[in-house]
Image (tube, rainbow, N blue to C red):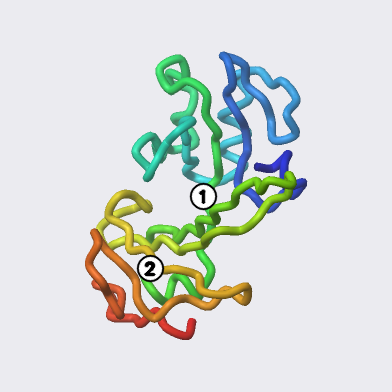
Amino acid sequence: SVRVLQTVAFPDIAYHVDGVFYGRDFSVIPRESLSDIAVDAGTHVFVKADRSAQGKAVAKIASRDLRGVDFGTIGDCVIQSAVEQHAFFESILPGPIATLRITTVKNALGGVELRAAFLRLGRRGSDRIGDTSVCVSVVDTDGRLDAVGYYHWHRLEVHPDTGVSFGGA
């Protein structure tokens, strides 16, 4: 995502691809430098394996413990620093970082079109977004949220843990 979108706004600090470690700039780095890079990024990092749908293949690891991680069993992955959640999302539910999912398609003319966007919000007691998330549609290009969200196909007008409403946000 860093390379495609040409931004440093992502928390990526390193990559492991086909047994090789790469730095944020995609230059090859020695395995031994991972711990130093991770410690510079904070007390914990997140190792996200490819195809880690719904947070199932994501591990939170103390930066100092990164040396002992067996990347051979993880496979291709990104190593990311922790991010600080924006106050708006923190007001809905403190803790698990909210994620915005944007679905696009390639049209018949080769252009890219937006088809859907939704916000995934965590639940109290979980440290990440996963299959227990609350989903709320983004209804317009200004980023306004729908008045209703869904949790396991149940319609909600407020977050089930905090009572914060979605509409008009």
Residue visible at 30% across and 80% down? Answer: 157
Camera-nearest residue between 37 and 142: 142
What is the quadrant of residue 61 in the picture?
A: top left
Q: Position of residue 14 (x, y in %)?
A: 62, 32
Relative to 25, residue 145 above or below: below
Q: Amino acid at mark 2?
A: Pro
Q: Residues within 10 Å of mark 2 (few under 14, many from 20)?
A: some
Residue beneath disc 2: 94
In screen coordinates, is 118 left or right of 132?
A: right
Q: Position of residue 51 (x, y in %)?
A: 45, 33
What is the quadrant of residue 161 in the picture?
A: bottom left
Q: Amino acid at mark 1?
A: Ala
Q: Position of residue 154 (x, y in %)?
A: 22, 67
Relative to 153, residue 131 above or below: above
Relative to 127, residue 147 above or below: below
Camera-nearest residue between 93 and 66: 93
The alpha-carbon separation of the residues under discs 1 and 2 comes to 15 Å
The image quadrant where one finds the N terminus is top right
| Element marked by disc 2 | loop
Camera-nearest residue between 134 and 31: 134
In screen coordinates, is 72 left or right of 160?
A: right
Residue beneath disc 1: 82
